Amino acid sequence: MIDPITPFKIQKVLDLCSGIGGFTLGHLISGGFETVAFCEINSYCQQVLNLRFPHIPIIPDIHDITTESLYGVGVTKVDGIIAGLPCPPFSLEGKRLASKDDRNLFGEFFRIICEVRLDWAIVENVPGLITAESGQFLRTVLWQFAQMGFDVEWGIVSASQVGAVHLRERVWIIAHSQSSRRGTSWSQYTQERTNTASVGCGDHCSFQRSSQSDNSVEYKARAIAQRTFSGGDDGFPTRLDRCLLTHAGLTDCLTAATVPSFSRLSRREIAALTLYCQQEYRQLWAEYQAIRRQHKQQLIALGNAIVPQCAALIFERLKRVLFQQRKTS
């Protein structure tokens, strides 16, 4: 019996700006997709990908993605593309140069869609994408999809919707082909572009959210780098208790990838300690800094990572879209 929301065949996926593989982990949760190649330039993230997915090739530079380079790593078929494109050009924390930022890779993203002749695409970015260049950047992105013969849905999904304690809102764009213009080549497409294009977004632009699982996750407490004093009558002032290098309530997997918390004392609070306690505090702070240095690349990778459970919701939506196409074809 055919799954009512699964495409006829497994969808072959090209994962761009892969990071540590959060997007691909998302479709592994959802099912029905197979990543055939990664594209990731960061060496630390490449190591993580090689560890997690040793059988999937990695092309480091997005500018090198062509049909020839994919064939060179054994990829002969790609149905869709997923991409967590760099967010600094659109982040509210940065200068928001958008199209004028060298880190904006939307141009390469569209080039690859045209060159590889893909049937669908998913792209993720920060909410600042919506308001970048007074909204014109997103309108142009939607217009570019339309010019290439794609229908587009977009909306915001946050990590809190899948059970996380933090918000982490992200914009997700789903583009799927239903048009005869699907065969437009990159050279034809670039000739047809116009800077005055604008794409509106009607009610159909927000995608439906899949129902969340009611399964609860039971976390096992675990402390790391814990000092001998842990509160109570341990001979140390209570002010030092809040500086403990501990992280309770994490799974073993998360503990291995998490730097413990550390609440710094003010100069006045440090001065109020005995000389021995001041030495202990400085030792704690030195240990904490050493851990942070050790995990710097890991922290950057985690900070940029896509939440797999959020990606799984998007893949569920895409499967419904592909199912509707199957019914009408």
Image (cartoon, rainbow, N blue to C red):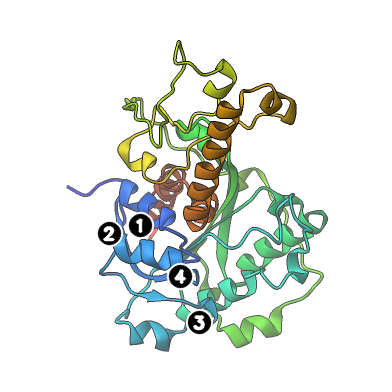
Q: Quadrant of the C terminus?
A: bottom left
Q: Nearer the viewer, residue 326 or 126?
A: 126
Q: Is residue 234 above or below residue 282?
A: above
Q: Residue at x 29, y 55 (%)?
A: 32
**Mark 3 or mark 4, which is nearer the start of the sequence?**
4
- Say which residue label 4 marks: 43
**Front position among marks 3 and 2:** 3
Q: Circles 2 and 1: CB distance less than 8 Å?
A: yes
Pointer 4 local density, CA inside 10 Å: few below 14, some 14–19, many at least 20: few
The circle on residue 326 is 1
Which disc is residue 8 wearing? 2
Which sits earlier in the primary sequence, circle 2 or circle 1?
2
Distance CA(mark 3)–CA(mark 1): 24 Å
Foreground disc of the pair 1, 4: 4
Q: CA distance from mark 4 to mark 2?
A: 36 Å
Closest to the camera, between mark 3 and mark 1, is 3
User: From where the camera sits, is residue 119 visible?
Assistant: no
Element type where label 1 sits in the image: helix
Q: How far apart, in angstroms, are the residues tagged by discs 1 and 4?
A: 40 Å
| Amino acid at the residue labelled 3 | Glu
Q: In the rendered structure, which amino acid carries the disc numbered 4?
A: Ser
x, y (%) of residue 195?
80, 73
Secondary structure beneath label 4:
helix
Instruction: Determine whether 246 is above or below 90 in the image.
Output: above
Q: According to the image, label 3 marks what residue? A: 115
Which one is in front in this view, the residue at disc 4 or the one at disc 2? 4
Front residue of 200/134: it is: 134
Question: In this rendering, which labeled residue sits more in front, label 4 or label 3?
Answer: 4
Q: Mark 2 or mark 3, which is nearer the start of the sequence?
A: 2
Circle nearer the N terminus (3, 1): 3
